[in-house]
Amino acid sequence: MRKRICALFLAAVLLVGIMTSSTSCTAILLRRILSNDSSDDKPQTEPNFEAQTETELEDQTDTDTEKDSEGENDMDISIYTTPEEMGISSAEITKVIEGFEENGLSMHSVLVMRHGEIVAEGYAEPYDKDTLHRMYSVSKSFTSMAIGLLESEGKISITDTLDKYFPEYINENTDQRIAKTKIVDLLRMASPFTKGSTYKGDTDMDWISTFFTAKVGKEPGSSFLYDTSATYVLCVIVEKVTGKDFLTYLKDEALLEMGFSEDSWCVKAPEGYAWGGSGVMCTSRDLAMFANLVMNEGEYNGKQLLPRDYVKAATSYQISTAPDPDSDTPFYGSGYGYQIWMNPYGFGFMGMGCQYAYCIPEKDLVLVCTADNQGNNEATGIIYSLFEEHIIKKVSNTSLTPNPTAFKEMLDALDGMEIPYQKGHATSVRMSAINGKTFVCTESNAKISSFRLDFNGDEGTLTYMTPRGEKVLKFGIGKNVECMLNEPQYSGEYINHPNGEGYRSYCSGAWTLTYTFVIKVQVVDDYLGNMTLSFDLDNSPTLTGKKTAEWFLDEYKMSGVSYRMQ
């Protein structure tokens, strides 16, 4: 595995700290996301340089300034300290990472920030600090801040009703409870509906129109119902008023000043508006930066980038979410703000698959992770509990005693993060008998009419025939192999508009039983999803496909489809 940013920590500790007798916490080199001038013990003037490798670290320590070699964001680089200096135990962070692995979670990144400084950061390949990752419903919190900016500029009021912005959708057949729904009702997830999103994401091509024709079941503003179509209406308002999509507007007015990724973007709905409910593509550092800004009530370096009063309201309890025994959110009953979830320690931005940014204002702490744990209903609770037990509850208001050994172990854990591969056996007594053999479906209208498995050491190939033509999927055994899931009809920049090539995926396989071979496919593209294909290869072969993905991979859903070996 190539070394990523964590190598900078280790190099600095080895070169600067461990070999010295200083009792103070070792200073290390790392890109700083945000500056925070509120801490009196931080230097007022800090060097601005970057080291990419151990050799460069040695070469550059006398350099006052260094431009980013890749021309990325102009964020400050500073000397700052280990987790212990920030009152966080390196050993406890290691326990979080180990907990992810022990519970079989598919984590893509984890980032811990305190007082505006990154104290721990790790990525699983193919992700790194520069990867624009799909944030799913975390996007809603970005949309909220764009609405707040618009109001602060006097361009809208959150008490405005929707008929002001969508007269083209209002007619004699429109239920007045929709027309008179206020922006603030949408911010609080209190639309006049009793079911979720009004659009069918995989078929509807005009999502806005569905909002104004959906069946109404209650008064707007009366009660909470999680509804992504409400957020979509909000981001369309931003675009109608500013002429920019909500993320571009937010970047231009606030985020770019902090070094937010210029190439960040948002997936678009079928009709062309940015999908502010689920489509933001940004880095984990971007998310941490944004969360820290919101936690600091919109202030950055003494400048008010977001309206303070709005941010305070958005991150405060606005409406009851009432405990839901079926929810996988452990703090579901803590309430909701303006497109932001409340929790017992503060608030958080939350997205499908476990894209999270937990903000703990009392501790000046931000915890970020990205992942794809779709289909795992326990993942949210596990992640939150690990963060709570090992970091939130144990953060100290003073520095801890330096612990170079624990620090190095933390770095190793962060650098060792990987996307889980299919567990099982590499071989089976059945493998030689079916290797390279073609299996033909005995049922009509099969999604997969034939398949062949070819094994070659620690890799293999699945070749299969579908109504869309022949497909080939490479997989690793005891490891992941990157491949392209060749389904060019899948959505790209625009929902329900083909991207023309399919999705980048990580694939692995293993024998889980003597006669059962399982292939796991994990999509790691602008869209995230996962599936398993279970081949029961006894004397009556069958194929079962299970998937967890939003609006794709349906072509692989099947249960016990029968085949015969040619």
Image (spheres, helix red, strand yellow):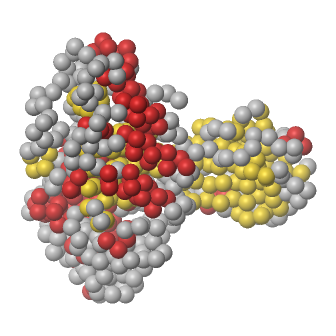
Q: Residue at x 23, y 40 (%)?
A: 399
456 is higher (above) or lower (below) than 48: below
Q: Tell me if I can see residue 179 in this picture.
A: no
Q: Is residue 19 above or below residue 89?
A: above
Give how far across and how far down residue 211 sits, in percent: 36, 75
Q: Which residue is drawn at the image coordinates 77% and 33% (left, top)?
A: 456
- Residue pictured at 61% horizontal, 59% vertical: 547
Tell me the quarter of the picture where residue 334 sits.
Answer: bottom left
Question: Which residue is at the front of the view, 98 or 371?
Answer: 98
Residue found at x 53% / y 40%: 418
Relative to 75, say whether 343 is above or below: below
Residue 36 in the image, given as x and y percentages of width and height: 16, 41
| Residue 295 in view (yes/no) | yes
From what the image shows, is residue 80 above or below residue 149? above
Horizontal side of 522 relative to 315 (left or right) equals right
| 128 with respect to 444 (left or right) | left
**Relative image position of residue 329 (x, y in whole percent):** 42, 67
